[in-house]
Image (cartoon, rainbow, N blue to C red):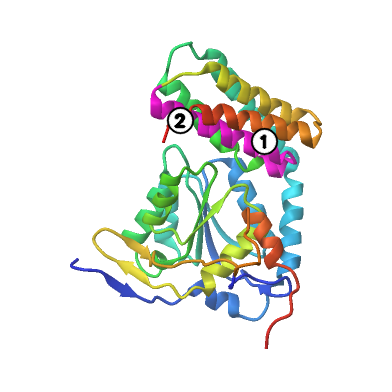
Amino acid sequence: MASGPISRDRINLDGASILLLDDTPMGMSILVQIVTGLGAKILHRCATLEEAQKATESCVLDLAIVDAMPPSGAGYEFVRWLRTTATEPNRYAPVLLTTGHTPARDVFRARDVGSTLIIRKPIVPTVVVERIFRATAEGRQFVMSDSYSGPDRRHRDLGPPNGVGRRYTDGDSFELAITDRPVAG
Amino acid sequence: MSGAQFVTPPNRLAEIMRKPGGIVVADAISRAERNLEAIRPACRADMMGLLDTCEAALKAMGEAYDEAAVTTLYATAVRGIGAGAVCGAPTVDLALTSLCDLITHLLARGQHDRKALEVHIQAWRLLMTTELPEAARETMLEGLRRVSAHHAPQG
């Protein structure tokens, strides 16, 4: 994971305006506890698609963490709306889409509505940090066309080189990424 | 819009992250983990509420295929995925994932298997309320996965 943070890096979410969308109090509570622990202070908590659209229209967003909200899929709808209808700069805000149960078709759906990255539940702080660093480090262009608006889908994480081993779960992977490894150069 | 337009918008979050200040990543993660521990009792109460709801839904379910009833069961169970870890019962997340897989397969095939649903919900309660040895938990999860896989579309 080339862009993953190491434990002595700093994360600065102090001035970041973050939209959280989750229709369950329990899910929202978990998100809030994680992002406030990571230092976020400006949160827009939304439980419905309509609330999220209203919040997006009334403030500038730097990050959105959106639950897919099955079975209605309102989370996907919000991301699609954000990418196609919201005004700049919010339409370009990085979106981390969280999913509990993720059949393959939903992974494609998350990508095709314009999510930046997906977080599979259980959501753990290490993975949220890793995704935030990836979302800020990537130089992905935005594509706008009749059929798709969102981050360029043509990117690939090649993973660790041969012989290093392959991550099994998100949580395991970050254990590797967060060690105090020496910084080259 | 004809053709695709490519733009490179400013990465506002990256600009914020580059500003002086913030927290060392290791400390930020520890703080977030402590915050999650603080909500463990409330999360556990919510999970038990979801479990009660699912048990009641199963009890009310008939013996024939009922798409609406099974969809409702899915909508309740899927809300619990991810909360098991926060409650201190991470294997519950795996049991719920297996239950949601099972329901997805049943809905795709228009089939009903009350016993398979029942065994998942019973396992959910057991994993929430009983201190089982790890080997027993693994055996139970493997059994649940086999039950779900049995209904998976072939090929």
> Is-magenta flag for residue B105?
yes
Query: How far is mark 1 from mark 2, CA to CA?
Result: 20 Å
Foreground: B57 or A168? A168
Residue B116 image position (x, y, % from top left): 56, 21
Residue ranking furthest to the top = B63
Residue topped by disc 1: B92
Foreground: B150 or B22? B150
Identify the chain of the residue marked 2, using the numbered disc in the image: B
Task: Name the residue rendered at 50%, 30% in the picture.
Answer: B74
What secondary structure is found at the residue carrying circle 1? helix
Task: Kindly indicate whether the residue at mark 2 contacts the one at mark 1 (C-beta within 8 angstroms).
Answer: no
For label 1, the crowd category at 10 Å Cα-Cα, with few meaning under 14, some 14 to 19 and many 20 or more, is many
Task: Name the residue rendered at 66%, 33% in the picture.
Answer: B141
Task: Name the residue rendered at 53%, 31% in the picture.
Answer: B149
**Secondary structure of the magenta portion, mostly?**
helix
Q: Can residue B47 be seen in this view?
A: yes
Over which residues does the magenta segment extend?
B84-110
Foreground: B9 or A180? A180
Task: Name the residue rendered at 71%, 57% in the picture.
Answer: B32
Would you place residue A130 above or below residue A24 in this image?
below
The image's mark for residue A21 is: none
Residue B100 image position (x, y, % from top left): 53, 33
Would you place residue A108 above or below residue B141 in this image?
below
Q: In this view, does A117 lie to the left or right of B44?
A: left
Camera-near label (1 vs 2) is: 2
For label 2, the crowd category at 10 Å Cα-Cα, with few meaning under 14, some 14 to 19 and many 20 or more, is some
- Could you tell me which quadrant the C terminus of chain B lies in? top left
Q: Dividing the picture into quarters, in which one does residue B98 lie? A: top right
Residue topped by disc 2: B105
Residue B13 image position (x, y, % from top left): 52, 72
Q: Disc 2 residue type?
A: His
